[in-house]
Amino acid sequence: MLIFEQSRTGRVNTAQQPANVSSDINTATTDIPDEFLRTDKPLLPEVSEMQAVRHYTKLSTKNFSIDTHFYPLGSCTMKYNPRACNTLAMLPGFLNRHPDSPANMSQGFLACMYDLQEILKDVTGMKEVSLSPMAGAQGEFAGIAMIRAYHDAQNGGKGDPERTEILVPDAAHGTNPATATMCNFKVREIPTNSDGDVDIEALKEAVGPHTAGIMLTNPSTLGVFERRIKEIADIVHKAGGLLYYDGANLNAILGKVKPGDMGFDVIHMNLHKTFSTPHGGGGPGAGPVGVSERLIPFLPVPMVTKVADEYHIVTEKSNALSIGRLSAFMGNAGVLLRAYIYARLLGRDGMTRVAEYATLNANYMMKKLEKAGFELAFPNRKATHEFIVTLKKQAKEHNVNAMDFAKRLLDYGYHAPTTYFPLLVPECFLIEPTETETQDELDGFIAAMIKIQKEAETDAEKVKGAPYTLPVRRLDDVKAAKELDLTWKG
Amino acid sequence: MLIFEQSRTGRVNTAQQPANVSSDINTATTDIPDEFLRTDKPLLPEVSEMQAVRHYTKLSTKNFSIDTHFYPLGSCTMKYNPRACNTLAMLPGFLNRHPDSPANMSQGFLACMYDLQEILKDVTGMKEVSLSPMAGAQGEFAGIAMIRAYHDAQNGGKGDPERTEILVPDAAHGTNPATATMCNFKVREIPTNSDGDVDIEALKEAVGPHTAGIMLTNPSTLGVFERRIKEIADIVHKAGGLLYYDGANLNAILGKVKPGDMGFDVIHMNLHKTFSTPHGGGGPGAGPVGVSERLIPFLPVPMVTKVADEYHIVTEKSNALSIGRLSAFMGNAGVLLRAYIYARLLGRDGMTRVAEYATLNANYMMKKLEKAGFELAFPNRKATHEFIVTLKKQAKEHNVNAMDFAKRLLDYGYHAPTTYFPLLVPECFLIEPTETETQDELDGFIAAMIKIQKEAETDAEKVKGAPYTLPVRRLDDVKAAKELDLTWKG
Amino acid sequence: MPFIPHTEEDVKSMLAAIGVESIENLFDEIPAELRAEGLTKVPEGVSEMEIARIMHGHAEQDSRALCFAGAGAYEHHIPAAVWEITTRGEFYSAYTPYQAEASQGTLQLLYEYQTMMASLTGMDISNASLYDGASALAEAVLMAIRANRKSKLKRILMPRTVNPKYRKVAHNICKGQGITFEELDFDLEGGHINPGSLPKDPGDIAALVIPQPNYFGVLEDIDVLTDWAHEHGALVIAVVNPTSLALLKAPGSWGEIGADITCGEGQPLGAPLSSGGPYFGFMACREKYVRQMPGRIIGRTVDLDGKEGFTLTLQAREQHIRRSKATSNICTNQGLLVTAATIYMSLVGPDGLSKVAKASHTNTENLVKKLEDTGNTRRLFNRPFFHESVMQFDLQTDELMKAMSARSILPGVIISDDYPELGNAILVCATETKTEADIEMYSDLVAKITKDLQSA
Amino acid sequence: MPFIPHTEEDVKSMLAAIGVESIENLFDEIPAELRAEGLTKVPEGVSEMEIARIMHGHAEQDSRALCFAGAGAYEHHIPAAVWEITTRGEFYSAYTPYQAEASQGTLQLLYEYQTMMASLTGMDISNASLYDGASALAEAVLMAIRANRKSKLKRILMPRTVNPKYRKVAHNICKGQGITFEELDFDLEGGHINPGSLPKDPGDIAALVIPQPNYFGVLEDIDVLTDWAHEHGALVIAVVNPTSLALLKAPGSWGEIGADITCGEGQPLGAPLSSGGPYFGFMACREKYVRQMPGRIIGRTVDLDGKEGFTLTLQAREQHIRRSKATSNICTNQGLLVTAATIYMSLVGPDGLSKVAKASHTNTENLVKKLEDTGNTRRLFNRPFFHESVMQFDLQTDELMKAMSARSILPGVIISDDYPELGNAILVCATETKTEADIEMYSDLVAKITKDLQSA
Ligand SMILES: Cc1ncc(COP(=O)(O)O)c(C=O)c1O
Ligand SMILES: Cc1ncc(COP(=O)(O)O)c(C=O)c1O
């Protein structure tokens, strides 16, 4: 039942209202002239506090989440979000700070931000970091905008207007090409070879004076480490392009190898992945960017500096070449606090262990699934923190596809892996267990996969009808898009 | 799956351990001699933080609760527990105060306690209040112990040793007779007449020089107001006994009538009922006691006084006649804070409204159920905040008893009312909707009752097999008591 | 190991299953010359107990100031239930509802949110959030350019009464796509866009941005402005404060046919100030523009058994399907904040939100009067305002700021950087959280500080 | 109306359904002369916003002191997850699991708790909680009297090394039933019960109470005491600190056959200090005494389909069944605190709890040494201790307390009221939450204050 269906006209929740204010929307209780005033009542629920609490508490239990289920959603790093990060970031002193507070009222907060910048520099091997982008995609935007700014500043400020292309491997996440477009670049796709690496020959053919840069993820979204990264960097750099690193997969390599050392010029991080800030049912995230020496002047503001033990906020005022601010204030500050707390809890050794155990878990699952007869997309490769199973055989032989497997997994109490991404692998399952799961949990998932495989062989219709045990059966997405019903109309 | 079944030897949760301490239980890392030391490892779970979070989060969702379900458990006042009461009582300044902090470090906390005492005095019409009892039953103990102390102080301190009996109506809650026993009184039961009132003639016969006092609830646990209370008070007082008021049902009369005015000498309140502090799956509660003039010297300590705008803690040191302390410190202080916040949110008018709407809801349900053909225990009476339906006809005609109805209600998403209490009403449903439920919710419950009634008529086995939709079907209580399995043995 | 559940034996058995000797072997595809020596600047790990103490220390450092600042971030009362429910693991630790059947909680909530926002703004539909108010404006501009098929020139009219930070962000995000922003100056008396100053023949404009209330807190002549824009073939992008919408005319009712796109900062709906984020941007529009909308949209549909359910819809607008042709690159948005906002709106209801708006208005009015009574400061603009006002002080604003902040009062936001012509101007705000005593403390302190500093 | 959902129309339709004119009519069975005129001393209602501000003010008043007090309430680190999960509505707002099928969450948790506590104490079984440590001791005494069928005299041997507040509570609760407590004095050198001082021929004793550690933090000769009691036909009631049990011998292993009943204060397992409550009492015992146990007990059983489940069991001991013959009057207990404790124990594990115990021991040891180094204070007892120690100061303890508390340090608990023979004695405690710097601050301050006051 929708909250609106529990609403009754005239029900008010007195405890949540300021006292001594008339509520009649039609009386000019203020001196504001009528022409500015609303005359109708907005459709907000008229429910008691308990009704709201009960409704949203019950709704919450209709979600799968990390706190309740194994959630091996590839490319999303659904690992445990330590509760302390939430509790401590919600201390009144942090919640009550107005973003325009002067620095003398902000030393506690700014100290955390400064330290976080330093931590991220170490982790990425980049020279400077700005924390402000509000998610991975905005980090990408910042990165590509910096590449544009860099080219524009070449030739003594006259720019390099030829450089209109961004290269993107065909396995790239959708945000990569979308970002390039937002920065007005043309996107040129680079194919992948059968081992999951970038097709170097194709790359060589693609680069040239029109190349502004390349966007890469390493490990790639195919769950393998791009081994010829140095060669790629050289090719792109020689052609005058810059290298952008999509840091969504940083969890796999923390402390093991640094993007800065691979030759990248700019990187974004997904703190909601690698630094375990909550995914919140779709956000908020945080997508700080790090750069090599030559891109420092272009970093987005605000940033935090430390001068003689005092912290200061750097804005566009002092950083004239900056691509500027991408949010009204300092990005998702509360998310950054959570990431900072997480980083301190882990510490330098803990970070490295994250990569190790994320990789261990992925390789373990990959091998076990392979032994159980599942086909790997890249059977000759080691897994990174994730790996790909292709269910094309199942789709062909039993007409049970990746989506069917995904829905049936829900019945077994597992969130499905990422399906149908990357697009180039047919009937694709991108599986990322993360380091925080136990061997038992992985074994349980593998057992479920084997059971579903058996079901596909013996009772394909059962699998195709899944799920059966959730609040709803399989939903009609086609109807949703055709007969748009986007708001409740009473 | 039990948490122990998810445990693995040697798994440790580093973030939750103090640093730099050896964990080996067998090495004397301390200077404590071996003879004092443990050599085996206790059976605590060895799980990761996420495993614990996931396990207990999932367990929680197997509960019905006020925040998720209508919970009309008679005599328990399962009304909405405002979330602010929890959030504010958990402010660091309150959580960190050590109970033995001197008064100069405690003025904030003591101010709240003092104000709460004053509020409870007003609500009950008693002369003085002590907050320390930790639940209703301990409040009862305090009350009866005070009655004993009072009689012991009679005759110039020689006491009144004849007074060995406490009168208890047969409808009384089990804690009443149990408490009398703990205070070494004999319990004499007084019958109830067909209208639900105490049988006055029987009472008159029962009182005498052996009467120490009577324990009454008014409104009684039969969901009716004891109309001849003044007469009862006179009878008991004349016989030299005192009147104890079990405040479990205070929700029905807040601001409408005060126990002090009815002639009671001592009262306990259930703050987890009337003042909406959480029931917590079985506690904690708080059972403050209030007394008339003559019992003031006997009140349990500690209490809080105010002298010249400063708050002080009163202990047994200054109150020589006190029955003393019943807990190491100040009772369930955090519960008291929640009750205080609740009282302030309601205010004097809000309190009175609680009684009004609790009564409205109960009478509405009672009438509707009666119209639907259910038999009321006291059809000629008004309901108070609760009322009784007897399902003896259903039990006889369809062999579907109150327990069956209760279990089937769970399938319909409603917590069952209190069943089989009070004992004197056969196949008893004690229904207490509370003031925080909407008419819609009440109607839903009534509709479910009607449906179950139909089921009982057409498919009794279905009802007797309920529940079907919960984490478990009906549990075997006999086996539980016969083949005791009280701890996991691996 | 913090948050890693593996015992030594687990590791052994897992390595055996994989068929490698050590975890290190799993990294052997990384070229040796690239391998890092571990981390050096990251501090050593600490326990939860230690970090708790560190963070308590930092939080206490920035101790609770009495806040009279607004300028895009507003201190409102947030019911305790909002974040107690929002941070339940099932909301907090879920992700984008890709598996709709396992995400009905989040999806239904978002559908309810869309309904509330559409109604509040008077628009037909709403998306499920953007990053923040500033970036939402940037997305609205990009959307308007796509939606206004008649306009060819990618020109946007951007009044200077729009929050200067929003204007910067819009510029920073849109400039790559060759969009030009033309400024509209404001009336120095009214602090608003004087309709009389609008160009007679503006040429090809894709959209006019109309803030209500504007950055100065002042109310714009929204009806006239809206109609003017539509007459000249421009779309109207409304930038509004959601709290104000309980009181002020919804953008859908501006002028003859209403605004086309509405966006703004959702923070006032249940998000704490928290140093500027996470907040959320909202965006609503006319149904005909829905396919130009950026961000997630939830639709109601049915399942195999015909039972009602909710799912992500119109995904063909989005980057994961449309890639370089998507309406935006946005992927992760601000779901948890929308969760909080939805619960907030349910708890306060239409009546409560209207009271919050009125109380904020009245408190600011009182503050302005009290400040004027000191004789040391005066309001700059004579037009009606919502819950902010620009005050001009006798003192240098940074001296005032220093003296007030030393007493834990944040007196407002200095706006002279963006509006040098306004002199010693501070944008002040007193929401419903401020009492009469708070307001008096502010004005008394201004009087005292002015006296002290002037006599020094 | 706060928390009441009724609209005026609801009320009308409900009154009509009932067939009365007004709500007032529903109260017409209350005799008119008893009717109250409403409330007068209860303040007017305030909004959540207002009470939040009031409570923040009160909480800040009792600002975070650096706490070296123990004496029955200990400041330990509590993982954030503990209370975030414990306060989930499903745990927080449920009641006693009378409907087992709808309470499997709470019931399974309690079964797990019983298992953990039984193992920690070395006993066979545990109940699901009593009010607090002090009242748990009272219940243990009553239980011992019932359980010790051989003893006729209701005599309990109660050492003075048991927490004096516990002794008072035990006395206050048990005295009605004619139980006599005989005190055992302690050794002034060791601060313990000297086994040599035990009576040769104690006569009929129902039980001996043995605290470990005792109130002074000192470790008792548990094995000798236990065997002595059993030799004389007395049961042994162990009163223990649960944290210490990760390190110290479990009562089940004391002496030849172990203690019979174990009880204590559960607060150290995840409950904040919070002014003394809510905490919880725990109680565990030998299986043969289970029917004498007070409080709830959960058992594992099966459902109609043979599936495992949990339910309240042995209810025939309890007041709602047995009424005046119940083992206790307890009904509502401390469920939520047990929820927190179970999660706490799961999060720290056996290894973590042992480290908490060791770190607390070591910190207290360091504190004692540092204090002795000042020359202004000395330890009173020469026996091994757990994490508390009685220190004698040169200064008057109340002067010291005043001077230290003015600096926001709580130096410990003054015990001279209960032990006048010990002079200026303070019971100090430094749990794992204290750092070296904290300890140094304490001892430096003692030195400074002593100097200042002595020279004044
Ligand atoms: C590989 C990759 N790149 C970029 C992104 C975009 O990050 P965000 O969703 O935070 O905008 C994602 C996440 O979904 C991703 O998996
Ligand atoms: C009528 C009555 N009296 C006494 C009690 C005992 O209160 P408590 O459970 O708080 O000990 C109860 C509650 O269960 C009750 O309903």
Image: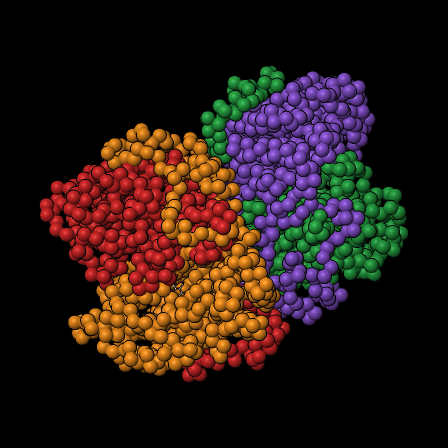
Chain colours: A purple, B orange, C green, D red
Relative height, residue C402 to residue A305 (above, below): below
Residue C353 lies, in percent from the top left, at: 64, 61
The residue located at (67%, 54%) in the rendering is: C112
Residue D437 lies, in percent from the top left, at: 36, 37
Q: Is residue B386 left or right of residue A199?
A: left
The residue located at (54%, 58%) in the rendering is: B461
Q: Is residue B230 left or right of residue A192?
A: left
Residue B15 lies, in percent from the top left, at: 45, 36
| Image quarter (top left, top right, bottom left or bottom right) of the N terminus of chain D | bottom right
Relative height, residue A488 to residue B368 (above, below): above
Hey, which residue is sitting farthest top in the picture? C33
Quarter of image, ligand 2: bottom left
The residue closer to the viewer here, A115 or C103, is C103
The residue closer to the viewer here, D145 or D306, is D306
The residue closer to the viewer here, D248 or D44, is D248
Residue C80 lies, in percent from the top left, at: 53, 55
Q: Is residue B307 left or right of residue A31?
A: left
Relative height, residue A380 to residue A4 (above, below): above
The answer to whether any part of residue A116 appears in the image is no
For residue A146, what is the image quadrant?
top right
Relative height, residue D277 to residue B199 (above, below): above
The residue closer to the viewer here, C107 or C256, is C107
The residue located at (58%, 33%) in the rendering is: A447
The residue located at (31%, 29%) in the rendering is: B27
